[in-house]
Image: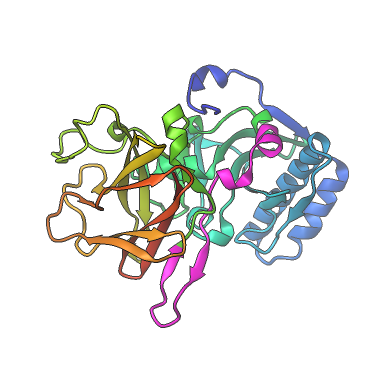
Amino acid sequence: MINNHDNTHKMRLLLPESIWLEPEHFDSAKNASEQVIGELKQWKTYLNALASLGFTKWLKEHLPEQIIKQNNQIIDNFTHIQLGEFKFCLIVTEHLLDELVNIPEDNIIKPEATAHLYVVVEVLEEQAELVLRGILRYDQLVSYRDRMNLQPTTGGYQLPLGEFDPEPNHILFYCRFLDANAIPLPVLTTVNNEDNLIQFLPKTKTKLSQWLRGIFLDEWQSIAALINPDINLALNIRNNADSIKRGKIINLEMQLGNYPVVMLVNIKEEAEEKLRVLIQLHPSGETKFLQPNLKLTLLSKAGKSLCEVISRSQDSYIQLNPFHGEVGKQFTIEVSLDNISIKENFEL
């Protein structure tokens, strides 16, 4: 697993990847900019087109065996590119002020505008050059936003450049050796027209048996990294030294206005290749209590509700009844409030 944060400042001393622009790139970008109205929009379209053309050239040179697609209809023209199953969102800039990267809010919360990898591209027009300043995975982006409780400004979310991986060859690593589904993206579906229920469905399953071998996806972090240790959590699992505990930020957004909670999963290996599972929901950060009427539900593989608990006023946490299962068994945990529902898929 690639660690994007170790020795970040030392890694910044590496020479960034440069991409030279060709005369035909400038001609195509100019033609594209002339299709929009307004000087500011024309300049933005021009820069985005240059970044897209140059980055596409770089991908073709390094990954000639893979098919490149482009969707110019999403959010901002030319900033979304797809290589095989991987979706890229280009964050295009002329210069980075104070080493801050601005990512539009829509590119994080709207399923049709999200991407597996976010690439910061600096356009040096006079030098006819692009510079790849860094990449960031979607799951790491959302994890940082929730962990730091970032709030969007007028232009979007501002992240320090130091959170981005400065090694462009990792793009090639991801595209060659990683399944795109390992970086879950939100999928917006309307499940019931009457209730207009909105669900964000991850495409992958968390395989809990891998935790026994010390293998964790980046979004599953230690409990200490997610919850204030000064808050009395009243965890029944604390005295279980043989168990493995991990937590993940679950962000209920949209109408709720960025409401993160923490899902804690505790597993313990038992006889006959079975696992014992305990799942809890906690407030994040300094918050002491969950919002009332927050629902935590255990669903079977077929979607049948097996167990459910609802938070009351001043509940510091809620939990499902512990359950056991054999390795390979699949289930889903749903967190819902009002008309927002988020599902996490698991396999023992």
- Name the foreground residue: 27 vs 55: 55
Residue 51 can be seen in this image: yes
Please name the residue shown 56% across and 30% down the image.
165
Left or right of 77? Residue 159 is left
- Quadrant into which the N terminus falls: top right
Q: In terms of depth relative to the viewer, which is nearer, 170 or 266?
A: 266
- Horizontal and vertical percent position of residue 262: 31, 46
Give above or below for 85 relative to 174: below
Does residue 302 show up magenta in the picture? Answer: no
Q: Where is residue 82 in the image (x, y as percent from the top left)?
A: 70, 51
Residue 198, magenta (yes or no)? yes
Q: Residue at x 56, y 20 (%)?
A: 11
Q: Residue at x 78, y 52 (%)?
A: 29
The tally of labels here is 0
Could you tell whether 304 is left or right of 117 in the image? Answer: left
Numbered range of the magenta stretch: 171-199
Quadrant of the drawing holding the C terminus = top left
Does 8 appear above or below 91? above
Relative depth, front residue between 29 and 64: 64
Q: Is residue 263 above or below residue 20?
A: below
Which image quadrant is residue 331 in?
bottom left
Residue 284 placement (x, y as % from top left): 26, 45
Q: Is residue 226 left or right of residue 217?
A: left
Q: Residue furthest bottom?
A: 194
